Amino acid sequence: MLAPTGELVAAALAGGGAVGAFNVITIEHAEAIVAGAEEARLPVILQISENAVRFHHGRLAPIAAATRAIAAASSVSVALHLDHVESDELLAQAAANGFGSVMYDASRLAYAENVAATSAAVRNCRAQGLWVESELGEIGGKGGAHAKGARTDPGEAAAFVAATGVDALAVAVGSSHAMVTRSARLDHELIARLAAVVPVPLVLHGSSGVPDDELTRAVRGGMAKINIGTALNTAFTGTVRATLGDEPDLIDPRRYLASARVAMAVTVSTALRVLKSGVIP
Ligand code: G3H
Ligand code: ZN
């Protein structure tokens, strides 16, 4: 069933865990994420990035409609989120295409410009009834929250939230996007300082590169939404490669896509259980 993103994040926080947010590129991704969540009996967020929309020839409607239908048929709560949006044109299409939330990404801008752009985006999102996440990277901006070595300053983060009115904030604490090995080490002392002064839920991006024990600690420290994309692609592509290697004459895509979908679902259910294990016993 469909659920609002804000409600899933709030419920996860209240329970001492975090909600997993997984990136959808193809229909098989959406089916796998929902299957993994159903297997774990836990809620999940399906997110489509601006990059993924670009892959679909710049058209949001077809992949959004398929994803929404898969989410609506689920036996667990599923929220729909538009991820890393930089284009105002795409932002304007969010609610009409069934999304309950958006991550507006002006993190490449300097601090003052990020505040101005994000504040305008928040007004736009409020008019559409959307929950809004945004991102703050290194002090003064210009670097994004997931550039290697970037760190979010707690005082600047608190000021950013007050100035923009966002509902959640992605912060730089040691993860970075598109890591294939799980070798990232997070700055847990910084997570604690951010959680103490930022009055909205914190979001971790680039979580594919973060080992399970680090994720668990981050969730216990207050991270409420955990974004995972690359790990699904690693499972998908690795399985397709192995299947085609084993069966060089195979030509029916359903055969290798079915195996890839199962591999992604296992990745999702495993990750969701880890995030839930952030709960303090
Ligand atoms: O917004 C999406 C995430 O930050 C995914 O990052 O592909 O490195 O897991 P990842
Ligand atoms: Zn991200």
Image (spheres, rainbow, N blue to C red):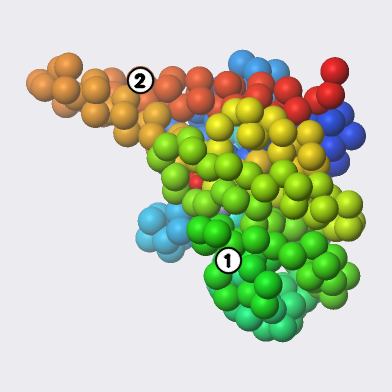
- The kind of secondary structure element at disc 2 is helix
In this rendering, the count of numbered labels is 2
Distance in Å between CA atoms under marks 2 and 1: 35 Å
Image point (24%, 28%), residue name = 241
Identify which residue is drawn at 88% across, 52% down.
Answer: 196
Label 2, residues with CA under 10 Å away: few <14, some 14-19, many ≥20: some
x 46%, y 27%: residue: 264
Where does residue 272 sit, x and y in percent of width and height?
Answer: 64, 26
In which image quadrant can residue 27 be found? top left
Viewer-closest of 80 and 159:
159
Type of amino acid at the residue the image marks with label 1: Gly
Q: Which mark is residue 88?
A: none
- Residue furthest toward the left? 249
Foreground mark, 2 or 1, reads: 1
Q: Is residue 186 left or right of residue 188?
A: left
Q: Nearer the viewer, residue 218 or 45?
A: 218
The residue that label 2 is drawn on is 259
Dot 1: what SS? loop
Quadrant of the image occupied by residue 142 = bottom right
In contact (CB < 8 Å): disc 2 and disc 1: no
Q: Is residue 132 above or below residue 138?
A: above
Residue 144: mark in rendering: 1
| Amino acid type at image mark 2 | Ser
Vertical relation: 95 (above or below) 112: above
Residues 48 and 191: in front is 191
Q: Position of residue 281 (x, y in %)?
A: 85, 18
The answer, for residue 27, to whether it is visible in the render is: no
Depicted 95 relative to depicted 215: above or below: below
Tell me which numbered mark, 2 or 1, is placed earlier along the sequence: 1
Left of 173 or right of it: where is 182? left
